[in-house]
């Protein structure tokens, strides 16, 4: 989780919680996020996992990836991928990809769980989590963790993250205004331009 967060041991709190706790929440701030604008679209894909074993160290025949996003109410979402056969501890998925829109990525945590799929039940064998607001785009092969928060030795997961930032209406209007100002700027007349360049050209 923390190698996605500048190699630090902490995830930065939202600005309104950094001093004074929740007493600093601005008046009218929507904690649910329902009224907040969408700032970015994300795609998180789980491509493969290596070295998969049960917590008892036994081999796994089938595995499923679950992607969960926790944050404000408006951003919460979840995907359960299809199970795939594990071969020599390696599994790849072509359907474990979650696309979602985010209002407050700085408060969102993405958790990826790998489930050991049995005949009647499925059990989480390892997981990986990261703060979405601090995540870097691209492919990452990262260490997985057991449910008791110990490192799952030899177990890694390959995750791909992509992001498309949304342009807000206010910034669009500002850009349009700047463009109009540029078009409407005064252009020196031909006579004044020639008089200014005349001596240099003589």
Image (cartoon, rainbow, N blue to C red):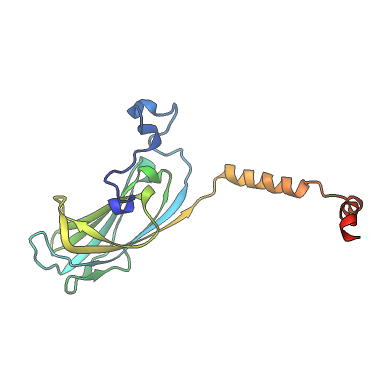
Does residue 2 appear anywhere in the picture? yes
Q: In the rendered view, would you say 64 is above or below 188?
A: below
Q: Position of residue 10 (x, y in %)?
A: 28, 43
Q: Looking at the rendering, in which quadrant would you find the C terminus? A: bottom right
> Which residue corresponds to the image point at 35% horizontal and 33% vertical from the top-left?
18
Q: Position of residue 46 (x, y in %)?
A: 31, 62
Residue toward you, 138 or 80:
138
> Which residue corresponds to the image point at 73% horizontal and 45% vertical from the top-left?
181
Does residue 124 appear anywhere in the picture? no
Q: Residue furthest bottom?
A: 87
Q: Is residue 57 left or right of residue 75?
A: left
> Which residue corresponds to the image point at 81% horizontal and 46% vertical from the top-left?
186
Q: Position of residue 166 (x, y in %)?
A: 51, 50
Q: Position of residue 90 (x, y in %)?
A: 21, 71
Quadrant in which residue 42 is drawn: bottom left
Number of marks in the rendered image: 0
> Which residue corresponds to the image point at 34% horizontal and 50% vertical from the top-left?
6
Residue toward you, 180 or 27:
180
Q: In the rendered view, would you say 121 is above or below 186?
A: below
Q: Is residue 37 left or right of residue 3?
A: right
Q: In the rendered view, would you say 105 is above or below 125?
A: above
């Amino acid at each position: 989780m923390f190698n996605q967060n500048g190699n630090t041991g902490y995830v930065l709190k939202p600005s309104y919680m950094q001093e004074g706790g929740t007493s600093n929440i601005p008046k009218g701030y929507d904690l649910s996020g329902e009224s907040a604008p969408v700032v970015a679209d994300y795609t998180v894909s789980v491509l493969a996992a290596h070295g998969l074993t049960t917590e008892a160290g036994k081999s796994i025949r089938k595995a499923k990836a679950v992607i969960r996003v926790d944050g404000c109410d408006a951003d919460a979402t979840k995907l359960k991928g299809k199970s795939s056969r594990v071969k020599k501890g390696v599994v790849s998925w072509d359907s474990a990809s979650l696309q979602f829109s985010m209002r407050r990525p700085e408060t969102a945590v993405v958790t990826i769980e790998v489930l050991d799929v049995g005949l009647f039940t499925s059990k989480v064998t390892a997981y990986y989590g990261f703060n979405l607001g601090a995540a870097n785009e691209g492919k990452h092969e990262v260490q997985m963790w057991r449910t008791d928060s110990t490192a799952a030795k030899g177990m890694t997961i390959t995750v791909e993250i992509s992001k498309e930032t949304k342009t807000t209406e206010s910034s669009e209007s500002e850009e349009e205004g700047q463009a109009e100002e540029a078009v409407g700027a005064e252009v020196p007349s031909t006579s004044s331009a020639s008089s200014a360049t005349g001596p240099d050209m003589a």
